[in-house]
Image (cartoon, helix red, strand yellow):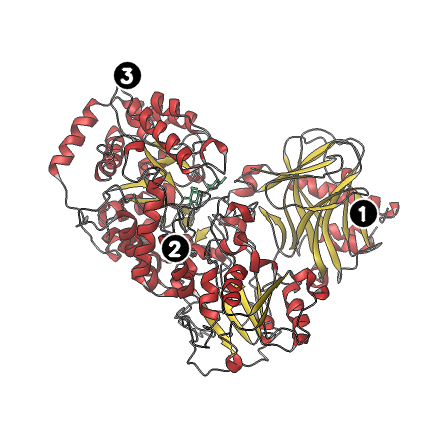
């Protein structure tokens, strides 16, 4: 429609290039690995440590006895950890599996609302299966692992503590121990034995999607906290309560340098020296070992091109031999498949390098069979298998699993009042108070007197999901409703309770409703609290290309500007998993609080920002930045100790009520230029839909539906459905299914117009990858638009090669071509849309706008 047919010829050229660039899944995702020179490695850089728990000869000979009674099949079974969606209790019995996990977002019976009773029923059934020796084999208790990373976060109703970045700001090691202890109890209530926490990453590039799982950019705090968290979770090694029925096994993860990858790419490559490994990234592991952490999770990432799951040097020479680690190394989610020569279902190299247990969610059966064969054929030495099983058994003994008996008879299992109980919630609320960092308080507008008219603005102010971030009930923290958080408080609810009690009035208004909001009091509000920030994400879904908050789509800045008309003190409460460039938002606020991702106890915020009814401070700000805050948008790598360190707020910064600091209201708003030497990629869909884009679907004449969560369908006649699917990794692609019932579209649109002119000038292309399983029916129209009657519209069949079905094809469309079709690149509203009236299915991933200077032949589309 928008595209004149004269442009057709040009798209054929694109097709030629598209075909040329067609690549298989594997070759797109995997970069060849480069081996470090062994000569650069130097064990002497590492401390020599002895295990904190002295070797217990009696225990070792007990293990000898078990090992000699176990068949090779039983031994290999111990090395396998499937996910509960893919392995039943009967599988545990039959294969003598050593462990299972429930992954992020998995609960018993695939029911997110599983009760504590349902959990115990299931953990007990799996335990009982592991102890069933009716086949004449040995009974070895199963160890069940779960990601309790900010509380027992996969369980509805659990206490959710602030994510690690907020705890880092609290600077309170003893608080961390108490949180570990409280978390262990909630975990034990469900019969789960083991948590994959703490993450002891030292995040160096805040574009990393797991920055919030890191306590600090500096090893100092990570070192202090790691041992306290392990003490809290497991109990203290020298005390009788160590790994008793109120404690669980801890994991220090991810070994090593997960926070040190190039450009903060999750699962990427840490291109750093060995000395940096020792000085920065090992700190938390060393201290976790001091507290007797029983398991270490190997990391997805590489170190100078070598995947850690395959690094004998790091896993065995360093960790086990030099650092004296005598527990076991668990793999990360299918990460072994990235080791040279490995696949998801076969990886002798990882076991030989020193991995002791494969985390192998769904493909565990072939992995079990292959590993068994590799042991029988000698590719994996029997001594290595015996060592791995010995380590696993040693941990199981230390954790008392051989003695604790059936799960449902354990001290805390199923106990009422612990999960999300009052005591733990009060602790979480204390943690929230301590984590808040006050960055600006001009005119000392904080604390706010509660006996006043207070306007609380922003959807985030009343949304437990957003304040809790990723790893919250679901893996990404998306798709949850208010009712899913029993007994939690939103930030607004906390404010409202205190304001009402003091005789004031607090009103909540969503950002979109601000124009129509009528304040009952003609005088308007006495103070305004605006809560906003990042939407939930986890792992690589949270990786970002740049650190400017709401780049190109300053929705919240616009709200701040509107709120200025009330002439009331304006307080920003910013929710985020990392520091972001917010100079404009700071300038538009009188006070600014970095609140991170506080979790279920939103009320902790009111405790600090409101005074008591007499005007006295209830709780002072105690948080101090554990991450440097950027002054310029190009400060993506900004860390304490840098040469030319020039942050807006340095590491350690944080005001208290006594501080007399007035921050300039005219911080540099241009932020400086990116100095990457070229424009950064603009991401639209890279696993997650990236801000400022939202994915919508809509039938012709139907309602516009925004897609939040893993699946959505147009309500009228279900003509279009979008679903998250796994391509290379979990939920990294979308499947779009048109039923043919009505004309319908999907589109990635922003709230405001995006300026992509610099990309156009740079010679960029719209790129994406697509897969068709069958030829198209009729036509699918692709469009990029700049508002009503502005844009380009092109038939999909022009550049997708329908002779190459069932394979991923990469398509690049030069922006210059689209400009010729009428796209005004200063005003892009929809970066990508697809429309069909016929029945069609396609899969889509990696939609980006990428500067691709050098691919100039495509520019001949001018035709
Ligand atoms: C699982 C998570 C896991 C992630 C890793 C998800 O599908 O639910 O537990 O961490 O995949 O790739
Ligand atoms: C994550 C781990 C997590 C595991 C199990 C992985 O994708 O990297 O941190 O423990 O999944 O959910």
Residue that badge 3 annotates? 134
**Mark before the other along the chain sequence, 3 or 1:** 3
Is residue 182 in view from this perspective? yes
Is 101 left, or right, of 4 in this rendering? left
Q: Where 422 falls versus 372 (above or below)?
A: below
Q: Residue at coordinates 31% horizontally, 55% vertically from top-left?
A: 178
Q: Position of residue 696 (x, y in %)?
A: 70, 47
The one nearer the camera, 424 or 844, is 424
> Is label 3 in contact with label 1 (beta carbons under 8 Å)?
no
Measured in 3D between alpha carbons, the distance from the residue under mark 3 to the one under mark 1, in whole angstroms, is 67 Å
Q: Position of residue 267 (x, y in %)?
A: 46, 48
Q: Where 72 falls versus 693 (above or below)?
A: above
For residue 201, which numbered disc appears in the image? 2
**Mark before the other along the chain sequence, 2 or 1:** 2
**Which is more foreground, mark 2 or mark 1?**
2
Q: Where 734 falls versus 578 (above or below)?
A: above
The residue carrying pointer 3 sits among few (fewer than 14), some (14 to 19) or many (20 or more) residues within 10 Å by Cα, namely few
Q: Secondary structure at mark 1?
A: strand
Q: Where 834 falls versus 439 (above or below)?
A: above
């Amino acid at each position: 429609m928008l595209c004149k047919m004269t442009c057709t010829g040009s798209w054929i050229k694109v097709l030629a290039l598209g075909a040329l660039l067609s690549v298989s899944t594997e070759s797109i995702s995997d970069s060849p690995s480069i081996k470090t020179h062994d000569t650069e490695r130097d064990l002497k850089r590492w401390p020599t440590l002895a295990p904190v728990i002295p070797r217990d000869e009696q225990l070792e000979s007990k293990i000898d006895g078990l090992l000699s009674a176990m068949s090779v099949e039983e031994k290999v079974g111990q090395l396998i950890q499937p996910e509960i969606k893919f392995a039943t209790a009967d599988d545990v019995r039959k294969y003598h599996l050593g462990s299972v996990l429930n992954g992020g977002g998995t609960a018993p019976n695939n029911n997110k609302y599983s009760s504590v009773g349902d959990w115990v029923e299931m953990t007990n059934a799996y335990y009982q299966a592991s102890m069933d020796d009716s086949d004449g084999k040995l009974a070895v208790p199963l160890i069940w692992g779960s990601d309790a990373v900010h509380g027992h976060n996969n369980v509805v109703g659990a206490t959710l503590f602030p994510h690690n970045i907020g705890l880092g700001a609290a600077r309170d090691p003893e608080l961390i121990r108490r949180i570990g202890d409280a978390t262990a109890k909630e975990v034990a209530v469900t019969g789960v034995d083991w948590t994959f926490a703490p993450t002891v990453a030292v995040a160096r590039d805040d574009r990393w999607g797991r920055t919030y799982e890191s306590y600090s950019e500096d090893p100092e705090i990570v070192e202090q906290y790691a041992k306290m968290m392990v003490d809290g979770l497991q109990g203290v090694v020298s005390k009788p309560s160590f790994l008793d029925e109120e404690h669980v096994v801890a994991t220090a993860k991810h070994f090593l340098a997960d926070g040190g990858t190039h450009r903060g790419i999750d699962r990427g490559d840490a291109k750093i020296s060995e000395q940096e490994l020792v000085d920065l990234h090992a700190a938390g592991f060393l201290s976790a070992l001091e507290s007797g952490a029983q398991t270490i999770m190997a990391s997805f990432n590489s170190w100078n091109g070598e995947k850690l799951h395959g690094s004998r040097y790091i896993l065995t020479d360093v960790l086990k031999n030099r650092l004296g680690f005598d527990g076991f190394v668990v793999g990360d989610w299918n990460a072994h498949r990235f080791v040279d020569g490995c696949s998801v279902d076969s990886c002798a190299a990882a076991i030989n390098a020193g991995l002791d247990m494969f985390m192998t969610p769904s493909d565990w059966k072939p992995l079990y069979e292959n590993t068994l064969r590799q042991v029988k054929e000698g590719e994996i030495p029997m001594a290595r298998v015996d060592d791995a099983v010995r380590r696993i058994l040693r941990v199981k003994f230390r954790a008392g699993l051989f003695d604790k008996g059936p799960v449902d008879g354990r001290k805390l299992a199923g106990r009422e009042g612990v999960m999300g109980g009052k005591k733990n919630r009060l602790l979480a609320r204390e943690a929230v108070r301590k984590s808040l960092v006050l960055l600006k308080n001009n005119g000392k507008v904080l604390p706010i007197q509660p006996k006043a008219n207070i306007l609380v603005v922003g959807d985030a102010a009343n949304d437990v999901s957003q304040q809790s971030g990723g790893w919250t009930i679901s893996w990404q923290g998306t798709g949850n409703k208010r009712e899913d958080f029993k007994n939690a408080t939103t930030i607004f609810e906390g404010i409202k309770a205190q304001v009402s009690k003091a005789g004031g009035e607090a009103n909540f208004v969503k950002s979109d409703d601000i124009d129509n909001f009528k304040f009952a009091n003609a005088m308007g509000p006495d103070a305004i609290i605006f809560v906003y920030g990042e939407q939930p994400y986890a792992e690589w879904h949270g990786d970002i290309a740049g650190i400017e908050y709401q780049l190109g789509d300053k929705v919240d800045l616009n709200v701040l500007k509107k709120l200025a008309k009330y002439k009331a003190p304006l307080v920003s409460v910013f929710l985020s998993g990392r520091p972001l460039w917010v100079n404009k938002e700071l300038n538009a606020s009188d006070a600014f609080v970095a609140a991170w991702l506080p979790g279920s106890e939103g009320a902790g915020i009111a405790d600090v920002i409101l005074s008591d009814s007499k005007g006295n401070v209830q709780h002072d700000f105690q948080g101090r930045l554990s991450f440097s805050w950027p002054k310029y948008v190009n400060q993506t790598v900004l860390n304490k100790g840098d040469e030319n360190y020039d942050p807006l707020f340095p590491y350690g910064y944080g005001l208290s009520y006594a501080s007399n600091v007035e921050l300039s209201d005219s911080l540099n708003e241009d932020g400086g230029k990116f100095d990457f030497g070229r424009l950064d990629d603009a991401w639209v869909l890279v696993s997650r839909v990236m801000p400022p884009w939202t994915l919508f679907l809509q039938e012709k004449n139907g309602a516009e539906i925004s897609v939040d969560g893993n699946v959505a369908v147009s309500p009228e006649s279900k003509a279009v459905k979008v679903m998250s699917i796994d391509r290379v990794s979990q939920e990294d692609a979308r499947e779009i299914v048109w039923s043919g019932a009505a004309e319908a579209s999907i589109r990635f649109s922003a709230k405001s117009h995006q300026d992509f002119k610099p990309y156009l000038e740079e010679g960029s292309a719209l790129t994406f990858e697509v897969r068709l399983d069958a030829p198209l029916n009729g036509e699918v129209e692709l469009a990029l638009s700049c508002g009503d009657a502005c844009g380009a519209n092109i038939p999909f069949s022009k550049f997708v090669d329908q002779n190459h079905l069932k394979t991923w094809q990469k398509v690049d469309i030069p922006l210059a071509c689209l400009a010729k079709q009428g796209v005004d690149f200063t005003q892009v509203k929809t970066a990508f849309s697809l429309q069909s009236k016929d029945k069609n299915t396609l899969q889509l991933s990696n939609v980006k706008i990428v500067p691709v200077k050098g691919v100039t032949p495509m520019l001949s589309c001018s035709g």
